[in-house]
Amino acid sequence: MENQTVVIVGGASGLGLETARLMVKRGALKIGLIDRNEQLLVQAAEELRGLGAEVAVAVGDIARKDTAHGAFEEIVGALGRVHCLVNSAAIYPRKDIFEITDEEWDLENAVNIKGTYHMMVAAVRHMQQYVAAPAVTGRIVNVTSVDAFKAHPQNAHYAATKAAVVSLTKSFAQACAKDQILVNSVAPAGFATERARQLGFLGELAAANPLGRAAEPAEIAEWIVMMGSSRNSYATGENVIVSGGYIYA
């Protein structure tokens, strides 16, 4: 990540913030954070500045094109060229498969699918200004989920949106290959976020995993950093599953 500028959507907390920390430790100079929670954005920015990064933040509704693109452009205005986009924003609900309402479907689709789409379009249009083939122009990493590949009747709408992001990733990868923009996704199993701890999910996650534990956020962030860094010069359209064997259980 040496000398790179990265925009992380959903970067104010959780996996997004953990990824930001690791990228700074690996040499990223500038970090842009986009999130809907202004208070957490301020706290995250202070922490990352303390690690030595230049940080810009933007509060934005990624579910709408104008506000999503506006947030990205706000970051560009502050930090300049963006080398990498990480899409880590998502809504994770649980609801019986027979009880999902129209409003719940609409919210999942708006954030998890449309939001990811809008941010990718904004990033690609920006990166296309810097094409110098055969050098890599930029990298996009979307956080999907192993739920996209397994039966999950307890959160089927979430799983469906993550399957859609896997598909979007492949389509963008093909569309952007000529511009040397690498687009990939990382699909973790459930991991030990603070929210998972608060909701009491850790025992459930551990019981379902062959390794007998949920991953720590830093273990997932390693793979996001790998796919978003200069160490990845050729992989595109790939989905990296990091599940501790859960995908096969």
Image: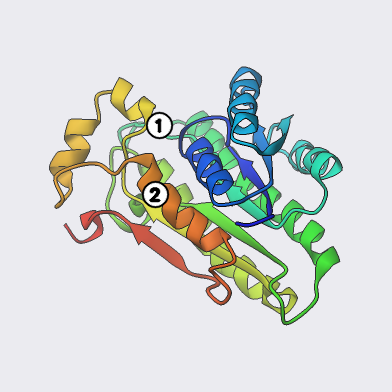
Instruction: Give residue 242's quadrant in the image.
Output: bottom left
User: In the image, what residue type sits under mark 1?
Assistant: Pro
Q: Could you say where residue 134 lies in the image, as x and y percent from the top left?
A: 72, 82
Instruction: Give residue 239's quadrant in the image.
Output: bottom left
Q: In front here: 158 or 191?
A: 191
Left or right of 194 on screen, residue 56 = right
Callout 2: 10 Å neighbours few (<14), some, many (20+)? many
Left or right of 211 on screen, residue 176 = right
Count of numbered labels shown in the rendering: 2
| Residue 189 to residue 61: above or below | below
Left or right of 210 on screen, residue 68 = right
Query: Which residue is the site of mark 2?
Result: 220
Callout 1: 10 Å neighbours few (<14), some, many (20+)? few
User: In the image, what residue type sits under mark 2?
Assistant: Ile
Between disc 2 and disc 1, whose residue precedes? 1
Tag shown at residue 93: 1
Question: Residue at point 29% right, 44% down?
Answer: 215
Q: CA distance from mark 2 to mark 1?
A: 20 Å
